[in-house]
Every structure is written in C-alpha cells, then in structure tokens.
Amino acid sequence: MKKIYGLITILSAVTLLISCTVKPPESEVIPGKEQYRPQYHFSPQKNWTNDPNGLVYYDGEYHLFYQYNPYGDTWGHMSWGHAVTKDLLHWEQLPVAIEEYPDPATGDSTMIFSGTVVVDKNNSSGLCSGKECMVAIYTSHVHKDGEGKRQHQSLAYSDDKGRTWKRYDKNPILDIQLKDFRDPKVFWYEPQQKWVMVLVIPDQFKTQFYESNNLTQWNKMSEFGPMGDTLKIWECPDIYELPIEGTDQKKWVLSLSNSHPQGPKFVGMQYFIGQFDGTKFTPDDPNQKPLYVDYGKDFYAGITFNNMPKEDNRTILLGWANNWTYGNKIPTSPWRSAMSLPRELTLKSTTEGIRLNQRPIHSLTSLRGKELKANEIAGKQLELEIEIDAAGAEEAGVKVLKSGEEETIIGYDAVKEELFLDRTNSGNVTFHADFASVERVKLKPINGKISLHIFIDHSIIEVFGNDGEQVISDQVFPTKDDEKVESYSKDGAPKITMKAWKLGK
C-alpha cells in the first residue's frame, strides 16, 4: 500500500453501485477516449486503482479485491474494489466491498489499505453464520486532514461470497502503536494447523510473522530483515512454497515491494529464497544480493491467490501494472491503472542458483484467434512467440506498435547478453519527465537461442524471456494507428522466427 499523505477531503460514505463486465469487446473501445483500455488485463470501469488485495478462490470464483478510489481517478479515499472471474481471464466488476469510513466523534477517517482474504473453512473466527465464510484482514489507515496518524490491522467478514461485508466490532485485531505498519498477508499453515500473518514495518525494512488459531487474536513469532534492497521502504509482503522444476524439492519464497532494479526513484519487487518452519523465514543465502521479480517499470505489489482448489496446485501471482513515480499522470480516462496478467510461479535451477520463474497462465491460449501470417502481423491486442538465434548479430528483436517513427523496441543485445524494452519513442511519453525509459535485464542464450513470449494489450506490454526466466512489464501509450510488428537486427543477419495471434475475449 503506497504511503501518501496528501490533503484529502473526506466525503460522506457512498456505495458505488456498479455491476458490469470490465473488458468490453475490442469494437466497443471508444476511439480517442478509451484507446488505451486493456482488453484482457483487468481495469476498473472508472477511477483510480492500485495494489491487488485479497486474492482468493472460493466456490468456483477467483476474487480480486484492489485498492480503489470511488471518487476520482487519482490516489485517495482508499477502499476495496471488487471483481470476480471463473477463469482468470473474463472479469466482472462488483460494487465496492469495503469502503473508507469516518469517525464522527474524533474527526478521523479510516482508509482501507492493502490486505488479504481467506476462507475460514471451520469457522475458527466464530464470525461465520454457517460452517464457513470469507474473512478479510486489512490495514486500517487512520488519518485526519490528510495526515496519517496510525496504521493497525482490522478484520471484516462476509457470509455471501464477498458481496457484502461487516466490520468486526472489536477492531483493530493487531496494533503495535506505529504510524507505518501494514499490508498483512494471511494464509493457513497446514503442518501446524494455524493461521500465519506476514506484514511489514516499511521504514525499518522488516517483515514480522504472527500466528493465530482464530484470526482475531495474534501472537508475534519472528522478524526478518533488513536484507537485500533497502533503498526504498518495504511494502506488500507475501510468502509461498514453490516446486523446483525437474526435482521433487520445494523451497519458500518471500517477496516484497520496494525499489526498482534501476534504483529508488522507481518502485519494483524483490524476493528471497529460503525455508519457513511455521515460525520464521530463513534465507538460503544470508548475503544474497537483491533478486527482482520484474525488470519493467510497471509491475508492483504482486501477491498470490489463497485457497486454490486442491486439484489445481498452481501458485498464481497478480500485480499492479503501474509505477508510483508517474502513476497519477498516465493519460487514461475514465479509469487509471490496471492489473498484470496472472502468472504461474515455479523455481528453476540456473547457473546463478535457484531463481523465480514466471509464465503467463496457459489458458490465455483460449483467447487466440487464427495464427497470423507474416505480412498480417499488426495490432494492439497481440500474442507473439519469437525465437532469436543470438549468434547471428550484435542485436536483434522486434519493433511493435510501429507507426512511422513511433515504435516500442523489444530486443536482445547479444554482446551484453541483455534483454531490453525501449519505450523512449513509444508514443505519448511527455506526460511525465521520468516515463520515457529503457529497461534491461541479463539473459543468457539457451543452446545459442533466446525465446520471447510477448503480450501486447493496447497500453500494456509484458515480455517473458526464455520461458519465464526474466520478465519486463511496461506501459506504453501509442498515438498512431498503424500498429505494425517488424523484426530488426544490427550488424548481422540473425535467424528470427515469429508466431503471432490476435487475442480476443
């Protein structure tokens, strides 16, 4: 949850009554107004959104709660928006779930910052009217006249599949008397039959771990940090166990949102690999250099889904596709910000050690139209599979969304062994001085070749290198309509093969 303390006028509580399909067919995008609206990434019908919250599967639906401003298209009045899907591809936006609320007695107001939803299957909380219910645990951000006073953790619960919520009458459930103490991720730890919460003290670069038998009373177990990247405050922690591909082993990953690989001017995500014994997280390498989840500028606050079906052993990550440096200024209307594609996570052994691997969920193939011929490849709503023989040139790749001199370049520098995305000439880059940029990440060829899996969705590009070894996610805002895709090379004639599909609904 982003720490912003601007002047905010507290409005009376209003219920936002919207029930709509978030992604209209491509033909319904309004030219000149919604030309940047992504079609297979989630975006709210209108207004501002940031961090995904409360990702959970329950009774046939995947739930996405998210930081949301019901009153405008910039950050403020943080509440929980809500959307559901049966396939992680087609989202239905529902009314606001949990809204900012005032305290008339003190003049304070409480915003609903980031947090978690769990399914309390055995009514351990005693709050469910039946055997089970959904429980949300979130940071209650108490402020007055725009100035933050305290953050603590609170609870709300729902007996109707998340459609309505009731705040717990004994909130807060965890308060250590700090101004900054936030972003609880709660999960069920099966080996010890208990609930575990991880959250952060942002400016101390620490995570804290708590345990509970009932979701309402919490005992501290341990702390982790400072470690890794401490150039920017820590936010939005998550912890999950992943398989190591090609083995029968698993390890735990602790992920956090903080600074970007290019430094603290931008935000990004880092992760640590180690073991969790139900009490504390121990990194495999206590001197580990920072490992980053995504090398693009537009992936932040990613968390994983709780309560995945037993027959589905995937770990699915979803992030916010924007950046705090320029997020309030991106040229979209009447909404601002969207979510990333859902990504399936594993671990993979590499020459550098065990590393996080990310792949777009396989069911995205269901959105493919017919495969495009080489002379047909163009558009703002595409999937590309590209293979580059890295020995054939110093640099090679593709130019996408190309209209005359306007283009976004996705390339591979064979000399430096770097994958890069260059959006300096991608269209509208003048709305903020820090938007135009080139993102780079080390990527070694496999058997002399580089593979790229690229998703283009109007204003969002996600590039998965070498089957998810590295990822770059960036926004772009093209101003012209040719939208061509062209391969290119420098100082050589490499072999480049490309498959392409238009993606529908």
Image (cartoon, rainbow, N blue to C red):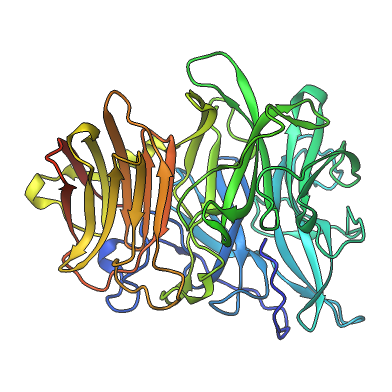
Q: Is residue 188 left or right of residue 314?
A: right
Total labels: the figure holds 0
Q: Position of residue 87 (x, y in %)?
A: 45, 43
Of residue 167 and residue 131, the one placed in the foreground of this image is 167
Of residue 264 and residue 354, the one placed in the foreground of this image is 264
Q: Residue at x 65, y 53 (%)?
A: 162
Q: Position of residue 268 (x, y in %)?
A: 56, 54
Quadrant location of the N terminus? bottom right
Residue 217 versus residue 233 in the image, above or below: above
Q: Position of residue 106 (x, y in %)?
A: 91, 81
Residue, far left: 375
Q: Residue at x 46, y 70 (%)?
A: 434
Residue 415 versus residue 11 in the image, above or below: above
Q: In this view of the protein, can residue 89 be seen by the observer?
A: no
Q: Quadrant of residue 464?
A: top left
Q: Is residue 154 left or right of residue 256?
A: right
Q: Position of residue 208 (x, y in %)?
A: 82, 44
Q: In this view of the protein, can residue 329 be seen by the observer?
A: yes
Q: Quadrant of residue 121?
A: top right
Q: Quadrant of residue 264?
A: bottom right
Residue 228 versus residue 146 in the image, above or below: above
Residue 155 versus residue 441 in the image, above or below: below
Q: Residue at x 54, y 22 (%)?
A: 244
